[in-house]
Amino acid sequence: ILVVDDDPSVQRFIADVFGDEIHAIATSSGCAALEEIARDAFDAVFIELSLPGAPDGVDVFRRITAHNPIAPRVLFMTEHPQLAAAVEGMTSRVCILKPLSREALISALDTAPREPTVRRISTTQRRVKL
């Protein structure tokens, strides 16, 4: 999991929620997130919508899905309900309202959509394992 948020307490909270099962990497800017994604594959990315500087959370999402043949699940986070509703409608992605809860994070990750290429690869991998 990649956590993209400029608040260290949010980074730690998400890492603690998923830490026993999943390796979590935290970064505080959109540029750093894109560098991490270029270096490594992630199953999921939690992105704060209002990142300082550029690119913001939606720009990071667009770049991730445009340039990766296997795009991770992308989940947005924000403190602003109106922004959350607008982004969910625009991107068809989950937007978790802050303050975060363990239950909201787990539920959001379980229901976050995957890109079609990920589903096809997962189906192929299952066939090979059988």
Image (cartoon, rainbow, N blue to C red):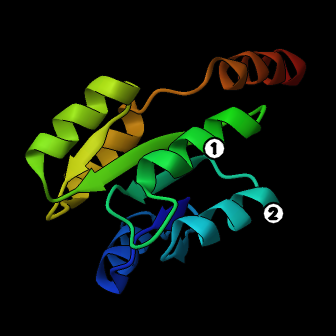
- Disc 2 crowd rating (10 Å Cα; few below 14, some 14-19, many 20+) is few
Location of the C terminus by quadrant is: top right
Q: Which residue shows up at 66% across the image and 52% down it?
A: 42
Residue 23 appears anywhere in the view: no
Task: Report helix, strand or loop for mark 1.
Answer: helix
Total marks in image: 2
Q: Position of residue 13 (x, y in %)?
A: 32, 74
Q: Position of residue 96 (x, y in %)?
A: 24, 48
Q: Is residue 15 above or below residue 58?
A: below
Q: Which residue shows up at 40% across the image and 45% down it?
A: 75
Q: Position of residue 78 (x, y in %)?
A: 23, 56
Of marks 2 and 1, the one in the foreground = 1
Name which of mark 2 and mark 1 comes first in the sequence: 2
Q: Is residue 89 above or below residue 61?
A: above
Quadrant in the rendering for residue 31: bottom right
What's the amino acid at mark 2?
A: Arg
Q: Which residue is mark 2?
A: 39
Comparing 121 with 40, the one in front is: 40
* Left or right relative to 55: residue 65: right
Q: Which residue shows up at 48% across the image and 70% down it?
A: 19
- Disc 1 crowd rating (10 Å Cα; few below 14, some 14-19, many 20+) is few
What's the amino acid at mark 1?
A: Arg
Q: Which residue shows up at 56% across the image and 58% down it?
A: 1
